[in-house]
Amino acid sequence: MKSTLKRYLIVASVLALSSVAHAAGADDGMELGFLPSAMDVTLLNEGGKFVTVDLKKIAKGEKCHLEKDAVIMKVGAGAASGTTRVRYAAPNLSHGGCPFMTEFELSDTDYTAARAAFTAKSDEASKKIDDLKKQLGDKWTELTKSAEPKPAEAPAAAPKQ
């Protein structure tokens, strides 16, 4: 049950962040990825971060642990050559893990692998949605149309006196 809840929360985070990424537009350069392997990372956030699960603060420069497939978001180039600065973009649900929005550096090779894993999952999800659209046909349009937000009605005019 605990691992199922964890998976649902991670998927919800990915969906929320991917919708933000689409809303931000391609010009913003927001990129998401899945961490290619479990690793200890060095926290780079100014002032440190508070870990809610452990009820403790991790100072800048201390290490914390991230599991394989953790959702990360590219922040920019790393301070050292051959690195990319990223941010952990999912909630921490286990003791000893990194806090939400932890910034750290990842080798360019690991970042490229993380990005490729995310892109592959995104493509797989798009293919499944396209297949579902084909299977459902007109029912898909009916279901998605009912889920669209309705335009707000104009306020009624005040009665003339």
Image (cartoon, rainbow, N blue to C red):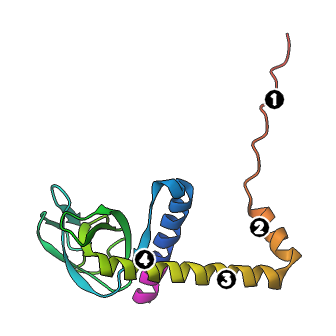
Residue at far top of view: 161
Q: Say whether residue 47 is magenta.
A: no
Residues shaded magenta: 1-8
Residue at far front of view: 81
Q: Nearer the viewer, mark 2 or mark 1?
A: 2
Asked which quadrant contains residue 23, the reply is bottom right
Secondary element at tag 3: helix
* The one of 159 and 48 positioned closer to us in this rendering: 48
Vertical relation: 39 (above or below) 16: below
Q: Earlier in the sequence, mark 4 or mark 2?
A: 4
Q: What secondary structure characterizes most of the magenta part?
A: helix
Give the side of residue 111 with respect to residue 78, left or right. right
Q: CA distance from mark 1 to mark 3?
A: 45 Å
Which residue is tagged 3?
A: 127
Which of the image's four quarters has the N terminus? bottom left
Q: CA distance from mark 2 to mark 1?
A: 29 Å
Q: Earlier in the sequence, mark 2 or mark 3?
A: 3
Q: What type is the residue that disc 3 sits on? A: Lys
In percent of width and height, residue 115 lies at: 42, 77
Which residue is tagged 4?
A: 115
- Which residue is depicted at the point 86% across and 13% down? 160
